[in-house]
Amino acid sequence: MDDPRKYYKDTTMRLLGRFQLLELALKVYVGVNYKVIQARVEGLIHFGYTEDDLSDLPLGRLLALFKKFNTNAELHARLQKLQTERNQIAHRSLLITMGSLYDRGAVEDKHIEYSMLEDELTECLQAVNAESKQLKKRVQSAA
């Protein structure tokens, strides 16, 4: 590997993109729950939450809402670990590639770490999507 910064930056950007996809998947899941609640309580009580209320929420808040609607404790734990990693990546990941802060060893180590994190993130994204599919099936069969 000549200069690991390019590979590291590419991996970091892919990770950030996948975290955005994870946020979208969580919004979809919570949004379906909001729609079900709205349909069930219509005429009984006012329920004003919609998918639009989720549009600007950060990952941490989305995870908290997801936990309220989902019972998969193993997935919750995995997602919580990812949130910690996401915050580190979003706020500090590129610093070690810049100017006097450049640390080739740290970049190489983080590149390897981020590659493994990318696999975990992909698996968790697939798991959230699977949870959404199951939820939609339950909703359709109950209708």
Image: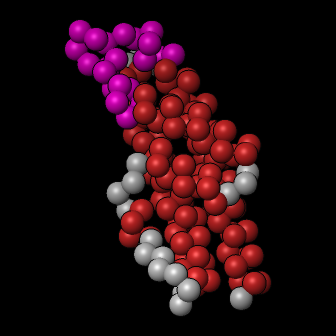
Residue drawn at (28%, 11%), measured in percent from left and top? 101
In the displayed image of the protein, which residue is found farthest to the front?
44
Depth check: give the residue in front, 142 or 81.
142
In the rendered view, would you say 93 is above or below 128? Answer: above
Q: How is the image coloured?
A: secondary structure
x and y, in percent, of residue 92 in the image: 35, 25
In the rendered view, would you say 30 is above or below 47? Answer: above
Q: Which secondary structure type mostly characterizes the magenta part of the structure?
A: helix
The magenta span reads: 89-109
x and y, in percent, of residue 85 in the image: 50, 31
x and y, in percent, of residue 110 in the image: 49, 21
Q: Name the side, left or right, on which 68 lies relative to 47.
A: right
Taking the image as drawn, is residue 78 in sight? yes
In the picture, which quadrant includes the C terminus?
A: bottom right
Taking the image as drawn, is residue 119 in sight? no
Q: Name the side, left or right, on which 101 lies relative to 58.
A: left
Residue drawn at (46%, 36%), measured in percent from left and top? 86
Residue drawn at (58%, 38%), measured in percent from left and top? 80
Q: Name the side, left or right, on which 62 lies relative to 39.
A: left
Residue 66 included in the magenta stretch of the image: no
In the displayed image of the protein, which residue is found farthest to the left?
99
Depth check: give the residue in front, 83 or 3.
83
Residue 104 included in the magenta stretch of the image: yes
Depth check: give the residue in front, 80 or 25.
80
x and y, in percent, of residue 131 in the image: 69, 61
Give the quadrant of residue 119. Answer: top right
